[in-house]
Image (cartoon, helix red, strand yellow):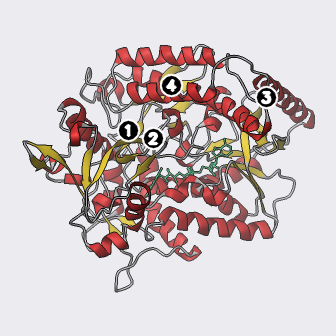
């Protein structure tokens, strides 16, 4: 029976998180509308090549879900909430079995058991993968389920629609306003429950491994409407990006999981510095550690290859069959974009912005501080603490999609019916202010280019809020961001033709990106310690007495106001995190 009298739940975002939540709600006979900026099958989840963590122990190494949990908490430098992470790790095998039932063809060994590969921050083979298209296969399988429910009238999709604003009264969600990116038509949808699953925000750094739609604009928009943003200072820098002209291509951690080695020259001889510094984990230390070591070698010791900011990722000793099969995506990227044959020459790489550990603050049921607004996937903050382990993100995206659905159901069934007049008033207010903002942007006639402002923002974020931060630079970065915000008012719009339409949308996204950039910078400025991806040489050690806490940023017209929340450490007492021989 379809639940009657309930408005469809709105899910903004059609990546793995959004689609799994949609399928789970449809299974519970709750109608859903999915809003997505891009066609759902092209969501960023499709880019994930490396794999997804889940304990199957088919290689008989004595692995356990508890060890997966320990590695995740340790890898996140004890900042992740332990009860939630434990449940996620325990659910991982069930998630893989569900995906297998939906048709995902994970790689298998000759005896038919799942094949597993190594990823950073673990000593056991725990990463399940589907050729070199793990994310794409999972996304497409979920999308097929969505299609099935669409045919039954349970799910409707709105692709090429951008989230503009939440409609709310006081502290309760009433619906959303969205805009068609081709026709610029505005629409509102009424709903007591909205799930935001809009992914990460790498584009605020300009060039990153993310796609250009990862602006974080939707998360920023609700942040400006009162939702708390948590742990903004924790931005993952992936150790191995190839610096292209417009974009950075990621070389998956799978390359090192399959035997790739990082080195540079020292005293005219190859120096495998990660293996020397961290003999237990070698090239598979977690990303924060590897990225910092590469930075230290290139920037501080000036030992980068050819004197540049780059080191070698060497796959020449990896079996040809592994390169052709298990690492085909890596080999293709090297050949198609850079004319490099990784069997013949090492790849030049440098760390690149990759993932936001921070995100919208949610409770254990994924509800934000606005009642009825939920957040899942990369745009929430819940599972990775100060540093995410590779292959844990697909898991968190799907797990949070699974987890949120029953709670959304409980929430909407427990709601008292709302007054129609309240909806009409709140909807009218948001539509009016959206139209006013749109008209204002359309007629902007100053002398600043929005694309140049974006470039400047990316450059300053990459300079001041990257691997190493210091308080003087962060202060300067915030001042410059405020200057950019002032210059935003003086933008010019070329409103002729379609480029004009996309410029209008970009200008609005840029304003949102600037707000989030300030969250990253101010959160980093306040945290006077080093933990996970946040490293301040002025405060080189972790300081649990003062900083074992989640950062919460609240929007104010003057800038983010920071407060803190306790971290759930109910299972493991935080101890020293070390990946050298003395490590765990
Ligand atoms: C190159 C690369 C490789 C990766 N490899 C791995 C890997 O091997 N293993 C792993 O675990 N993780 C990997 N990750 C990370 C992982 O892919 C992502 O964190 C995860 O897929 C995010 O899923 P999601 O559903 O939260 O968001 P996404 O898949 O990014 O989906 C976001 C959705 O939101 C929509 N959207 C965005 N903004 C708006 C808006 N304003 N209005 C309306 N809709 C909007 C988009 O259209 C899209 O449908 C990789 C990341 C990158 C960049």
Residue for badge 2: 357
Q: What numbered label is drawn on residue 202?
A: none
Which residue is rendered at x = 55% and y = 49% of the image?
Answer: 377
Above or below, 218 against 8 in this view is above
Residue for badge 4: 456
- Judged by depth in the image, the label closer to the viewer, 1 or 3, is 3
The CA span between labels 2 and 3 is 31 Å
Residue for badge 1: 386
The CA span between labels 2 and 4 is 24 Å
**Residue 308 in view (yes/no):** yes
Dot 2, how many residues are within 10 Å of its Cα: few (below 14), some (14-19), or many (20+)?
A: many
Q: Earlier in the sequence, mark 2 or mark 4?
A: 2
Dot 3, how many residues are within 10 Å of its Cα: few (below 14), some (14-19), or many (20+)?
A: some
Above or below, 84 against 371 in this view is below
Q: Earlier in the sequence, mark 3 or mark 4?
A: 3
- Judged by depth in the image, the label closer to the viewer, 3 or 4, is 4
Q: What numbered label is drawn on residue 438?
A: 3
Q: Nearer the viewer, residue 283 or 124?
A: 283
- Judged by depth in the image, the label closer to the viewer, 4 or 1, is 4
Which residue is rendered at x = 88% and y = 30% of the image?
Answer: 428
Q: Nearer the viewer, residue 325 or 302?
A: 302
């Amino acid at each position: 029976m379809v639940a009657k009298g309930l408005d469809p739940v709105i899910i903004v975002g059609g990546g793995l998180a959004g689609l799994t939540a949609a399928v789970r709600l449809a299974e519970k006979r709750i109608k859903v509308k999915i809003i997505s900026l891009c066609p759902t099958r092209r969501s960023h989840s499709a880019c994930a090549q490396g794999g997804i963590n889940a304990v199957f122990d088919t290689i008989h190494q004595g692995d356990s879900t508890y060890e997966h949990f320990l590695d995740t908490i340790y890898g996140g430098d004890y900042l992740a909430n332990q009860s939630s992470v434990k449940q996620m790790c325990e659910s991982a095998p069930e998630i893989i079995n569900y995906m297998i039932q939906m048709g995902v063809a994970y790689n298998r060994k000759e005896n038919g058991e799942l094949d597993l590969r190594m990823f950073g921050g673990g000593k056991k083979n725990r990463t399940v993968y589907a050729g070199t298209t793990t994310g794409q296969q999972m996304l497409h399988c979920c999308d097929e389920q969505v299609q099935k429910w669409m045919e039954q009238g349970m799910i409707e999709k709105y692709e090429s629609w951008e989230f503009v604003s939440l409609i709310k009264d006081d502290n309760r969600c009433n619906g959303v306003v969205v805009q068609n990116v081709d026709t610029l038509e505005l629409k509102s949808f009424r709903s007591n429950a909205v799930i935001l699953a809009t992914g990460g925000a790498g584009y605020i750094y300009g060039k990153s491994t993310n796609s250009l739609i990862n602006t974080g604009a939707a998360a920023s928009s609700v942040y400006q409407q009162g939702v708390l943003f948590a742990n903004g200072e924790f931005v993952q820098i992936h150790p191995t990006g190839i610096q292209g002209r417009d974009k950075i291509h990621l070389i998956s951690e799978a390359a090192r999981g399959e035997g790739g080695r990082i080195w540079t020259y020292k005293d005219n001889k190859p120096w495998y510095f990660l293996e020397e510094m961290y003999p237990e984990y070698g090239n598979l230390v977690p990303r924060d550690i590897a990225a910092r070591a590469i930075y230290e070698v290139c920037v501080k010791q000036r030992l980068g290859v050819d004197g540049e900011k780059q080191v070698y990722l060497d796959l020449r000793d990896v079996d040809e069959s592994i390169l052709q099969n298990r690492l085909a995506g890596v080999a293709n990227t090297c050949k198609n974009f850079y004319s490099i044959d990784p069997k013949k020459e090492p790849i030049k790489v440098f760390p690149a912005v990759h993932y936001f550990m921070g995100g919208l603050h949610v409770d254990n049921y994924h509800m934000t501080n606005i009642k009825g607004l939920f957040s899942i996937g990369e745009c929430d903050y819940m599972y990775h603490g100060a540093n995410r382990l590779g292959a844990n993100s697909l898991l968190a995206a799907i797990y949070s999609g699974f987890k949120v659905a029953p709670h959304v159901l409980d929430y909407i069934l427990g709601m008292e019916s709302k007054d129609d007049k309240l909806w009409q008033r709140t909807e009218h207010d948001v539509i009016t202010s959206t139209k006013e903002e749109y008209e204002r942007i359309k007629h902007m006639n100053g002398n600043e280019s929005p694309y140049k402002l974006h470039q400047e923002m990316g450059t300053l974020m990459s300079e001041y809020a990257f691997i190493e931060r210091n308080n003087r630079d962060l202060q300067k970065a915030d001042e410059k961001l405020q200057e950019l915000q002032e210059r935003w008012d003086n933008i010019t719009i070329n409103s002729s033709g379609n480029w004009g339409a996309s410029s209008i949308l970009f200008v609005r996204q840029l304003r949102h990106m600037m707000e989030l950039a300030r969250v990253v910078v101010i959160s980093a400025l306040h945290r006077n310690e080093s933990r996970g991806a946040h490293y301040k040489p002025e405060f080189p050690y972790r300081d649990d007495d003062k900083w074992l806490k989640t950062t919460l940023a609240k929007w104010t017209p003057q800038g983010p106001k920071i407060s803190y929340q306790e971290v759930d450490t109910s299972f493991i007492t935080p101890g020293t995190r070390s990946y050298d021989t003395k490590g765990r």
